[in-house]
Image (cartoon, grey):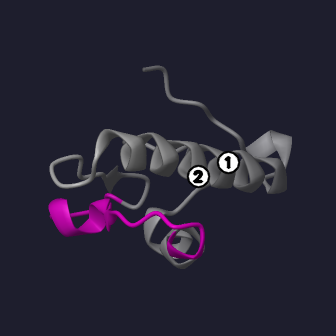
Amino acid sequence: MTLPSAMDSKALLPRAVSHGVAYVPGTGFHTSGGERHLRLSFSHPAPRRIREGVRNLAALLHDEAEQVPLRTRQLTPC
């Protein structure tokens, strides 16, 4: 997953864990950079828990995006 440019997946991880979501920051998969990326795992949790995790992560990212000044927001098209 790629986050908006003003977000850092490693810095955001402790807040995500407090919201019941864990992921691997993208820096572990890039030789240089990767701060805006994160890796989600869907292999073990039950579908109900995956949906819950996605909702929790979406709520966290929404809250985080509201804290970023509009002039620094850059969305990446999917």
Residue at the top extreme, as displayed: 78
Instruction: Please tell me how crowded label 1 is: few (under 14), some (14-19), or many (20+) other residues with Cα within 10 Å.
Output: some
Question: At 82% from the left edge and 48% from the top edge, which residue is drawn?
Answer: 66
Residue drawn at (28%, 66%), measured in percent from left and top? 27
The numbered disc on residue 59 is 1
Indicate the amino acid at tag 1: Ala
Residue 67 in view here: yes
Task: Determine contact: label 2, label 1, CB under 8 Å.
Answer: yes
- Spot occupied by residue 62 in the image (x, y as percentages of width and height): 71, 45
Answer with the quarter of the image where residue 29 lies. bottom left
The stretch drawn in magenta includes residue 18? yes
Residue at x 18% of width, y 55% of height? 44
Question: Which residues fall within the magenta stretch?
Answer: 17-34
Vertical side of 1 occupied by 32: above or below: below
Q: Is residue 43 left or right of residue 49?
A: left
Quadrant where the C terminus sits is top left
The spot of residue 22 in percent (x, y) is: 39, 67
User: Callout 2: helix, strand or loop?
Assistant: helix
Q: Is residue 11 above or below residue 78?
A: below
Determine the secondary structure under disc 1: helix
Q: Circle 2: is it few (<14), some (14-19), or many (20+) Cα within 10 Å?
A: some
Residue 10 x, y percent position in the rendering? 44, 72
State the residue position of label 2.
56
The amino acid at mark 2 is Asn
- Any magenta on residue 66? no
Q: Is any part of residue 33 visible from this angle?
A: no
Q: In terms of depth relative to the viewer, which is nearer, 33 or 12? A: 12
Above/below status of 38 relative to 21: above
Instruction: Give residue 3's mark.
Output: none
